[in-house]
Amino acid sequence: MTSEREKFAGRLNETLDERGFPRLGQGRQSELAKVLGAPPQQVGKWLKGQDFPRTSQLVKLAHHLGVRSNWLLAGAGPKYPEEMSEEAESATRLPAGVEERRTPPPLSQTVLTREGFDLALMWMRLPPSQREAVRALVRSMLPGH
């Protein structure tokens, strides 16, 4: 059985192949580490399916490679941003008349707990209509609603 980390590594290596990075064992790890400003040992763990990147590194990685972070992390949704359907894009927007109540911390300060990471993986596997239902439920449970 293939773990989620190994599946992530497969998507990452596939995209690096498409982008012309050196092969694994021929400089891929060091080149990617240099591009991201990350320790080579850490990057090696991502490439071999031993670990996931931190949220901030995942966002940098997806941006640099031109792929959606949801796809890179969990294989959810289209690979490239331009492949998003209008339905999927609208599902990520807040409903009319609803404003975001808090500004999230900058990604560089965001640390995901294991529980938060597991929830994020499950969230990304939901279809847009179910995401909206969960979003509405969570909002209704927040203090002040």
Image: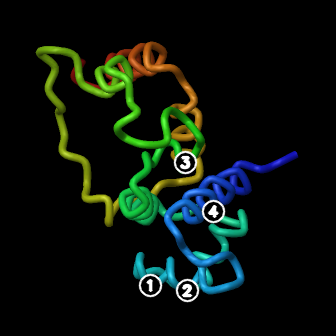
Q: Is residue 123 above or below residue 102?
A: above
In what element is the residue under mark 3? helix
- Are there few (<14), some (14-19), or many (20+) residues within 10 Å of tag 1? few
User: Measuring 52% from the left and 54% from the top, which residue is drawn there?
Assistant: 113
First of labels 4, 1 by sequence position = 4
In what element is the residue under mark 1? helix
Q: Nearer the viewer, residue 11 or 49?
A: 11
Q: Nearer the viewer, residue 113 or 85?
A: 85
The x, y position of residue 100, in whole percent, is: 18, 32
Circle nearer the viewer, 3 or 4 = 4
Distance, label 3 to label 4, CA atoms, is 21 Å
Name the residue type under label 4: Asn
Distance, label 2 to label 4, CA atoms, is 14 Å
Residue 34 is tagged as: 1
First of labels 2, 3 by sequence position = 2
Marks 2/4 in contact by CB < 8 Å: the verdict is: no
Name the residue type under label 2: Ser
Residue 26 sits in which quadrant?
bottom right
Marks 1/3 in contact by CB < 8 Å: the verdict is: no
User: Measuring 32% from the left and 26% from the top, which residue is drawn there?
Assistant: 89
Marks 4/1 in contact by CB < 8 Å: the verdict is: no
Circle nearer the viewer, 4 or 1 = 4
First of labels 2, 4 by sequence position = 4
Can residue 131 be seen here? The reply is yes
Image colouring: rainbow
In what element is the residue under mark 2? helix
Residue 117 is tagged as: 3
The residue that mark 4 highlights is 13
